[in-house]
Amino acid sequence: MFNYPQNQRFDKPSFKKALKKSNHGSGLVPHRASLWCGAQHMKNWALDIIFPKICLGCSRFTAIGDFDYVCKKCFGEVSLKNTFECVGCKRQTHLGLTCVFCKKESELDQLLIAAELSDSVIEKMLKTYKYKFVSDMAKPLSVIAKKCIKKLLSKGFNLFEDSPVVISVPLHKNRLNWRGFNQADLLARSVADSYHMPYGEKVLTRVVNAKHQAEAETKEERFSNVKNNFVVTNREAIKGRTVILVDDICTTGATLNECARVLKNPPSGGGAKRVIGFVIARG
Ligand SMILES: [Zn+2]
Ligand SMILES: [Zn+2]
């Protein structure tokens, strides 16, 4: 466990919900909405003065040019993955392709992991993003994802070569309402936008609100916990295409595999050609 700086200011789901409401037809007339946003801006400005943001790496105050919670120096030192591994057995494979042995039970064709979870800054960024509801963390994490894509290009692998559809691992609507944002969704949208790739809206829906994967103790429990949790709700968007499935973090790969199974396998599934998992780190 690590200690967060005591005066760190974190977003609350209720605030995010309010923000979402203001942006999506809440019934607020435009000038009231902009006044509301202006008020929020002032509030954030005042809070930044009272509670300056602190770097998760070096605990110094962040400054102009830094990300909100990670300074330029610490961000520059983040370790990117140099090798890739099979989603099933974790053995090193070329570009994270699923090995022949794991192919039998893994529907995910390839796993791309951007950074090392053993890097303490990465670990703190992901935990702050996921468990402290800091949606601003999507910015530096997206940059890490883009650095990984650039690195893949230098190895001769163009992730976007066959015009894939980018999607994210969905949250159940109850969890989304509680959290206020889907951490995987923000990353996926940012990656899709940066490379002008289509983002698959509501391609996959999580229909079962199972217990959190972190609460499942064994690998078997993790696989059964996510079984039949997802359905394809926009088959046309993915039929015959490569899908890049984005999540913030993976451990056993149970969720990515279950999503890939549903995305690929007809008749109930989507008929996707192949599914590439793309995560920031693996736990
Ligand atoms: Zn720092
Ligand atoms: Zn394997």
Image: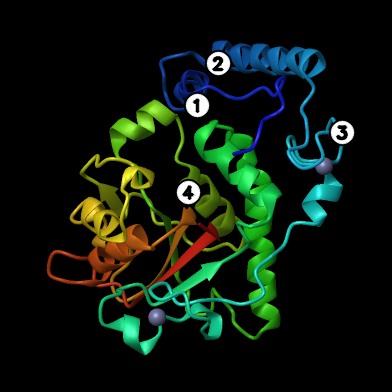
Residue 126 place in picture, x, y as percent: 58, 45
Q: Earlier in the sequence, mark 3 or mark 1?
A: 1
Q: Quadrant of ligand 2?
A: bottom left
Alpha carbon distance from label 2 to label 4: 27 Å
Residue 148 position by quadrant: bottom right
Ligand 1: does it lie within 8 Å of the C-beta at label 3? Answer: no
Going by the picture, which residue comes out furthest to the bottom?
A: 100
Alpha carbon distance from label 2 to label 1: 8 Å
Looking at the image, residue 129 lies above or below residue 278? above
Q: Which residue is rendered at x = 52% and y = 63% of the image? A: 197
Q: Secondary structure at mark 4?
A: helix
Q: Earlier in the sequence, mark 3 or mark 4?
A: 3
Residue type, numbered disc 3: Ala
Residue type, numbered disc 4: Ala
Alpha carbon distance from label 3 to label 2: 29 Å
Q: Earlier in the sequence, mark 2 or mark 4?
A: 2
- Is any atom of residue 70 visible in this view? yes
- Give the residue number, with chain letter if any, for mark 4: 184
- Give the residue number, with chain letter if any, for mark 3: 63
Q: Earlier in the sequence, mark 4 or mark 1?
A: 1
Q: Are marks 2 and 1 in contact (CB under 8 Å)?
A: yes
Q: Secondary structure at mark 3?
A: loop
Q: Residues within 10 Å of mark 3 (few under 14, many from 20)?
A: some
| Left or right: 156, with 218 as reference point | right
Residue type, numbered disc 2: Ala
| Left or right: 130, with 50 as reference point | left
Residue type, numbered disc 1: Asn
| Left or right: 28, with 173 as reference point | right
- Give the residue number, with chain letter if any, for mark 1: 23
